[in-house]
Structures are given as C-alpha cells and as structure tokens.
Image: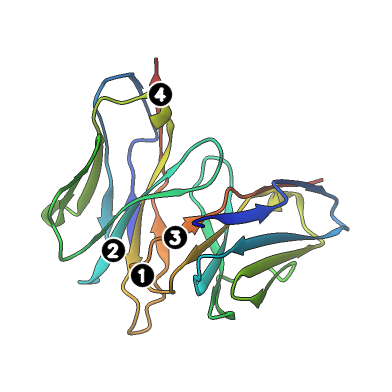
Amino acid sequence: AQKVTQAQTEISVVEKEDVTLDCVYETRDTTYYLFWYKQPPSGELVFLIRRNSFDEQNEISGRYSWNFQKSTSSFNFTITASQVVDSAVYFCALSEAHGSGNTGKLIFGQGTTLQVKP
Amino acid sequence: DTEVTQTPKHLVMGMTNKKSLKCEQHMGHRAMYWYKQKAKKPPELMFVYSYEKLSINESVPSRFSPECPNSSLLNLHLHALQPEDSALYLCASSLDRVGNEKLFFGSGTQLSVL
C-alpha cells in the first residue's frame, strides 16, 4: 500500500531561521512521482515541486531546496531564511505512474503547518 | 491564464436544499478533479474527469453529483447533504490524467450544511 508520512504536525520558527519539513513515503512501485504543495490561508494548493523516482538530484529554487533520498524513502523540504509569507500548510504527496491499471491518484501526507513569526 | 476559478467562495445550505458548485479553467487541461478537505486534514479525492468523461469516483455518496459540460467547466451538484459534508471543496485541473502531472487548484468553496 502507498503511504506518505509527515511526522511534524506543526512547526513554529522565527523569521530568518532555516526550517526543514520531513516527508517519508512507502510504495512498491519502481516508477512514481513525489510532490510538494503549499496551502496558504487563502485555501488554494500551490504546486512547488515534482520529482520522479529515477531522479535523485537535489534541487534548489531560491530559498527552497529539496533532498530526495531513495535509500531512506524520504523527500525533505528546506526553507532557508524563512519569511512570514512562508506561513502555510505544506503537503507532501505521492503518485503512482499512470498505466498498468494505476490511476495516477495523489496520496497526500497529513500536512505540516508552518508558522513563521516576525 | 493559469487560474482555476471556483464559485461561490462560500455557501451555506440546509439539508433539503439543492445547490451547485462551479469550476472553470482555460488552460486547455483535459483532466479535472474534485477534492474534499476537512479542517486540518489533507485533501481527499472525490472525482476525476478525463476528456470530459468520469474516470474515477472514489465511492462518493450519490448526494454529490459531478458534471463536466465541456473541457473547461466542472460542476458539483449537491442535494440532501448532511452536516458532516461541511468542508472546503477544491477543484483542480491538470494537462492530462497521468501521475506525473502537477495539479492547479482553485481556492475552493467553503461549504456549511446546517
């Protein structure tokens, strides 16, 4: 069965601190995709990153970076020099590859609420 | 235009009412989704339309009835809802219904059933 675990329910940091959000996943598929979405108080989920199971390169985008480690089934997300605008709920998600009867359905983790205080 | 627009933003309805939620996108996406999200929980998939045909129904009660009139529009018809159906209803779209496609979400309809 597929599963995504975000063990951190809530994190509170002070502005300019670095913060890492953890994501651990379980799947028997050899081909799969991992995502991070941000949900600010306005409600819409905003896509942040997609990574396929064959690409273990870490990625950096501005203050955001992602560390994908297949050996530990983890896809962690780090925000450097956090800002108040980073306050949101962050979801990690796993998707099966489409085909062979797979639906491409997204399996979401429970989410981590990040509060960045000024 | 990279937006998914949902109306209304808020809806209060009684258990005997009939109402509809609307979703629209003009990105040429061929897959559209309805998700339900309770407070402090992740979104739960309800329905998926692919090329205007219903491809996934996650065992949703029949009091929720989806409709896809064309490739840009997605409706969710509500009838005889229960108070436990109160939630944020999110619409999303993607280029196609494959696992690697990123989803574009609307800001949702906050539904309260009295």
Per the image, the residue denoted by label 1 is B99
Residue type (three-letter) at the residue carrying disc 1: Gly
Tag 3 residue: B103
Question: What's the amino acid at mark 2?
Answer: Tyr
Residue A57: x and y in percent read 12, 54
Residue under pointer 4 = A84
Residue designated by label 2: A33
Horizontal side of B83 relative to A19 (left or right) equals right
Is the residue under label 4 in contact with that under label 1 (CB below 8 Å)?
Answer: no
Q: Secondary structure at mark 4?
A: helix
Q: Quadrant of residue A35?
A: bottom left
| Earlier residue among tags 4 and 2 | 2
**Is disc 4 surrounded by few (<14), some (14 to 19) or many (20+) residues within 10 Å?**
some
Which of these two is toward me, A116 or B72?
B72
Q: Is residue A40 left or right of residue B74?
A: left
Q: Are marks 2 and 1 in contact (CB under 8 Å)?
A: yes
Say which amino acid is labelled 3. Leu
Q: Are marks 3 and 1 on the same chain?
A: yes
